Image (cartoon, rainbow, N blue to C red):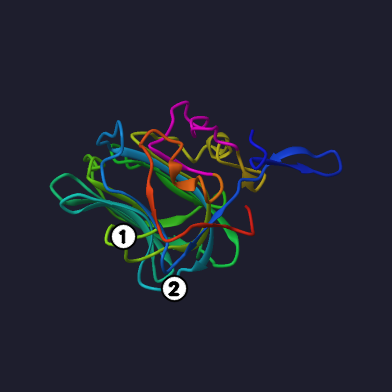
């Protein structure tokens, strides 16, 4: 591992993975890719993991991720403190609408969010917050294909630059076309173990054996470089290194 990827615990604790985090300030900073992701494909499945220290989730829209073509085809965001997950097919029809009712996600503490979706099977869906199964209202869950292959992909805002994320972020992982059963504690432990982050590999491939479309990790000067397969992002504003790590 690079020197910033692991820190030594005292008392014979050995190496523990403590990833660096970056600051999305909620007013200027976000990452955008004004083209489709490399090797992207539409799918009924996706898998997301990330560590977030939210500084503000109270407003109407704080976007973690979205893509947009002729319509808004997938988004994960907060609206008035609740985590929302939405997806559409290529025709712009909503095929996934989900709201995390509990637990209530707080500001001022590190939160691990893990999401696994397989629209082909309503049993294959889960959201875990800090390793606990969330209570989710699945308003729409249609056996259809999500339109991932669009011309704009944004982390930390809408494609128009609104709804900016206010959080420290570490190890943001988003795999289109991949799925893991998160009800399995062994699968959750591929992302979070003992309440701590797990090293996902230089390209994020360790959890499933295949690198994800998006894997953003490291310090501010390298975070937008996308260690996954989809290609790099352009930074608007200035990401800075967070003083806290998960």
**Horizontal and vertical percent position of residue 29:** 42, 61
Whether residue 210 is in magenta: the answer is yes
* Quadrant, the N terminus: top right
Q: Which quadrant of the structure image shows residue 12?
A: top right
Residue 202 visible, this angle: yes
Q: Which residue is mark 1?
A: 158
Q: Which residues are magenta?
A: 199-217
- Which residue is found at the position 54% from the left and 66% from the top? 106
Q: Is residue 113 above or below residue 23?
A: above
**Horizontal and vertical percent position of residue 67:** 28, 50
Q: Is residue 117 left or right of residue 90?
A: right
Q: Which residue is mark 2?
A: 58
**Horizontal and vertical percent position of residue 164:** 39, 64
Residue sitting nearer the eye, 230 or 178: 230
- Determine the residue located farthest toward the top in the rendered image: 209
Residue 124 visible, this angle: no
Residue sitting nearer the eye, 104 or 15: 15
Residue sitting nearer the eye, 129 or 92: 92
Q: Is residue 3 above or below residue 164?
A: above
- Determine the residue located farthest toward the left in the rendered image: 91
Q: If you read the primary sequence from the N terminus, does the residue marked by circle 2 or circle 1 appear first?
A: 2
């Amino acid at each position: 591992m690079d020197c910033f990827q692991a820190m030594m615990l005292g008392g014979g604790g050995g190496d523990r993975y403590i990833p660096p985090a970056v600051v999305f300030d909620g007013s200027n900073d976000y990452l955008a890719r004004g083209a489709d992701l490399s090797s992207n494909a539409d799918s009924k499945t996706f898998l997301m993991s990330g560590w977030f220290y939210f500084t503000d989730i109270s407003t109407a829209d704080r976007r973690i991720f979205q893509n947009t073509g002729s319509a808004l085809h997938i988004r994960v965001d907060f609206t008035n403190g609740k985590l929302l997950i939405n997806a559409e097919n290529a025709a712009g029809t909503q095929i996934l609408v989900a709201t995390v009712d509990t637990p209530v996600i707080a500001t001022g503490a590190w939160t691990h969010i893990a999401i696994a979706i397989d629209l082909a099977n309503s049993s294959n869906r889960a959201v875990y917050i800090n390793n606990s199964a969330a209570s989710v209202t699945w308003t729409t869950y249609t056996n259809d294909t999500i339109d991932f292959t669009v011309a704009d992909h944004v982390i930390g805002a809408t494609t128009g630059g609104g709804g900016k994320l206010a959080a420290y972020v570490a190890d943001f992982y988003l795999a289109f076309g991949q799925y893991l059963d998160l009800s399995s504690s062994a699968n959750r432990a591929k992302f979070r173990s003992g309440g701590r982050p797990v090293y996902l590999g230089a390209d994020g491939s360790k959890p499933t054996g295949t690198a994800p479309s998006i894997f953003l990790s490291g310090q501010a000067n390298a975070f937008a470089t996308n260690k996954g397969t989809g290609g790099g992002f352009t930074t608007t504003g200035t990401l800075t290194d967070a003083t806290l790590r998960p």
